[in-house]
């Protein structure tokens, strides 16, 4: 069974609310914590907070940067882990590193063998068919030369992270031009994809546009 979990923030991970949807509890899993997207943002405080949360839960994890790695290196490393947890940050830089390293091919090879993919924000966006959602942000991140927004296509839908009600009008307008449905996640929700089954967990209504 392929297991993919997309989150808007790390709250459900920090609260250890995902175990029911995993082959084994996070506390008993080896986690590769990919923080590549944080390399091109003004502050990495959120990385330290998440690491502190995981430390308190006694999670076994290693921080890792996929930039500059080869496909062979990634396969060797990822084959030794139960979970790859891809953190948020600059989606464009993350996608650039994904493409240059062969990360997508390795993940797609290992998912059917039991590797669990967990994404947060940018880590969720790259799992979708496109990262077009990242272009709607006002944060003005460096796009790192990315003009083709094609993602890893691990999901059959697009996703918008960090949703608040004030975004509704903008998203309704943007969704008119999309060929795929867009699922909305606030910071207290996660999308669980296990093979063909899709399930929303957390606080708040399910919104699909």
Image (spheres, rainbow, N blue to C red):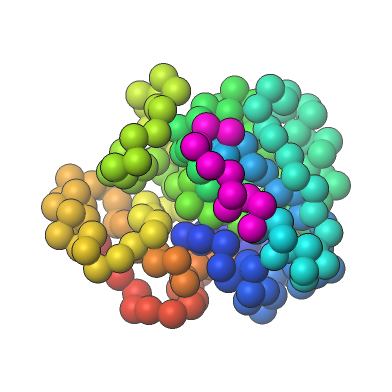
**Residue at the spot 23% in from the left edge and 47% down from the top edge:** 178
Measured as percent of width and height from the top left, residue 176 is found at 15, 51
Looking at the image, is 187 positioned above or below residue 124?
Answer: below
**Residue at the spot 22% in from the left edge and 63% down from the top edge:** 166
Viewer-nearest residue: 188 or 28: 188
Which residues lie in the magenta part? Answer: 39-49
**Residue at the spot 24% in from the left edge and 68% down from the top edge:** 165
Measured as percent of width and height from the top left, residue 106 is found at 68, 37
Count of numbered tags: 0
Horizontal side of 81 relative to 104 (left or right) equals right
Residue 112 seen from this side: no
**Residue at the spot 71% in from the left edge and 49% down from the top edge:** 33
Viewer-nearest residue: 101 or 86: 86
Magenta: predominant secondary structure element? helix
Viewer-nearest residue: 24 or 44: 44
Quarter where residue 170 is shown: bottom left
Looking at the image, is 73 positioned above or below residue 8?
Answer: above
Viewer-nearest residue: 136 or 80: 136
Measured as percent of width and height from the top left, residue 6 is found at 52, 59
Looking at the image, is 99 positioned above or below residue 25?
Answer: above
Horizontal side of 145 relative to 133 (left or right) equals right
Measured as percent of width and height from the top left, residue 34 is found at 67, 44
Quadrant including the C terminus: bottom left
Residue 139 seen from this side: yes
Q: Is residue 167 magenta?
A: no
Quadrant including the N terminus: bottom right
């Amino acid at each position: 069974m392929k297991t993919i979990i997309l989150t808007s923030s790390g709250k459900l991970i920090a609260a250890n609310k995902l175990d029911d949807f995993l082959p084994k509890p996070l506390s008993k899993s080896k986690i590769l914590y990919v923080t590549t997207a944080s390399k091109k943002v003004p502050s990495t405080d959120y990385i330290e907070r998440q690491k502190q949360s995981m430390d308190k839960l006694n999670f076994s994890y290693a921080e890792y940067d996929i930039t500059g790695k080869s496909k062979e290196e990634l396969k060797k490393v990822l084959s030794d882990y139960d979970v790859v947890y891809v953190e948020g940050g600059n989606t464009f830089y993350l996608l650039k590193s994904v493409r240059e390293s062969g990360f997508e091919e390795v993940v797609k090879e290992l998912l059917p063998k039991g590797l669990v993919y967990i994404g947060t924000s940018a880590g969720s966006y790259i799992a979708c068919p496109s990262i077009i959602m990242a272009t709607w942000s006002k944060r003005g991140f460096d796009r790192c030369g990315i003009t083709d927004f094609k993602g890893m296509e691990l999901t059959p839908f697009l996703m918008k992270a960090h949703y608040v009600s004030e975004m509704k009008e903008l998203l309704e307008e943007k969704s008119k031009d999309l060929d795929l449905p867009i699922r909305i996640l606030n910071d207290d929700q996660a999308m669980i994809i296990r093979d063909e089954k899709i399930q929303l967990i957390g606080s708040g209504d399910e919104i699909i546009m």
